[in-house]
Image (spheres, helix red, strand yellow):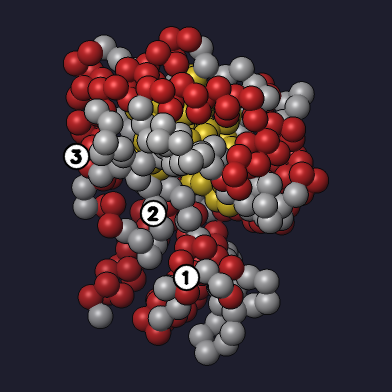
Amino acid sequence: MQYRNLGSSGLKVSAIGLGTNQFGGKVDQKGVTNIIAAAIDAGINFFDTANVYQGGRSEETIGKAIKGKRGQVLIATKVFNPTGEGHNERGSSRKHIMDAVEASLHRLDTNYIDLYQMHRWDKETPIEETLRALDDLITQGKVRYIGSSAFASWQIAHAQDLAGLHGWNKFVSDQPHYHMLERHIQEEVIPACEYFGLGILPYFPLAGGFLTGKYKQGQSAPEGSRGETSQYVQRYMTDENYHFLDQLTTFAQSRGHTIGELAHAWLLAQPVISSVISGATKVEHVQANAKSVEWELSAEEFAEVNQILDVEESQ
């Protein structure tokens, strides 16, 4: 496994992280325990969850699975989305953050969170209030580092400037939607993260499984796959994207790799990427994702893939 600094911080995270949004739902406790054990064996130390994944059960199952292994792993979770019906059970207010972090600590059965992320920007709460609350959590030792998720470039810039002005702890990462078919962050978010020293943690690197090659043009989605019902996956099932997928698959196979490995390798070829958050519902998924770090794209290979992407974009 390869390890990288989380943004400009000194924290070392595995280049492949583990996404856990199906833990406690599609994946039961036994499955979670096995997946996490396999991840640790593969050198993965960075596990990403959120307080709302599966109604909090993702955090609960992770907490049970890491019993006796807490020092080996880094836990990243998030706050913002509704956790109840109350008016103050959502958002980025001091009250909700303070309540939510205690609930997450309880579910994870730990006394600290390695990376606490704002799941989304809250337009109803002054960012100063949010940043001060997060800074207090670091001072209290309940949180080690803080980050954002899906922030716009101006939101990242505003938050970093305010934190610097007041002497508060700054965000060290942002977690955006980013993969070979979803590249809008390249225009402004990536430059902002590079300038302010934030590490990028891409989620859905395989486009919900579309970039594994399991879906074939003109054929029904495999039984039990996400593509059967997920509108997210289905939106990529276009003639253009299947043509694009064929080109990338040929590129990967000619070099002895899979399209899934290429999807990870393309992201990791960018220095601003700290860790790729790859979801897994089976041990085999973890092992395949971890294997991706073995392929380090050369500058020529990276340029060739980008040329394919540019050609596809202009068609």
Name the residue: 73% across, 45% down: 32
Amino acid found under the numbered disc labelled 1: Gln
Real-space CA distance between mark 1 and mark 3, rounded to the nearest whole angstrom: 29 Å
Residue 92 visible? The answer is yes
Could one spot residue 9 in this view of the protein? Answer: no
Q: Is residue 275 left or right of residue 292?
A: left
Which percent across, then down, holds residue 265?
A: 48, 54
Q: CA distance from mark 1 to mark 2?
A: 17 Å
The image position of residue 10, as x and y in percent, is 44, 21
Q: Give the quarter of the image for residue 57.
A: top right
Asked if 168 appears above or below 235 in the picture, the reply is above
Say what secondary structure mark 1 lies in. Answer: helix
Indicate which disc, 3 or 2, sits on the residue closer to the N terminus.
3
Residue 79, given in percent of the width and then of the height, sits at: 45, 34
Which mark identifies residue 154? Answer: 3
Residue type at mark 3 is: Trp
Give the labeled residue for mark 1: 231
Q: Looking at the image, do the residues carrying marks 1 and 3 touch, with CB atoms under 8 Å apart? A: no
Q: Position of residue 274 (x, y in %)?
A: 44, 38
Q: Residue at x 62, y 52 (%)?
A: 22
**Point 34% across, 71% down: residue:** 308
Number of other residues with Cα within 10 Å of mark 2, as a class: few under 14, some 14 to 19, many 20 or more: many
**Left or right side of 51 for 93:** left
Asked if residue 113 lies left or right of residue 185, the reply is right
Q: Which residue is mark 2?
A: 178
User: Which of labels 3 and 2 is toward the front?
Assistant: 3
Tell me if residue 22 comes above or below residue 162 in the rendering. Answer: below
What residue is at 48 percent from the left and 55 percent from the top? 204
Dot 1 or dot 3, earlier in sequence: 3
Tell whether 65 sits left or right of 210. Answer: right
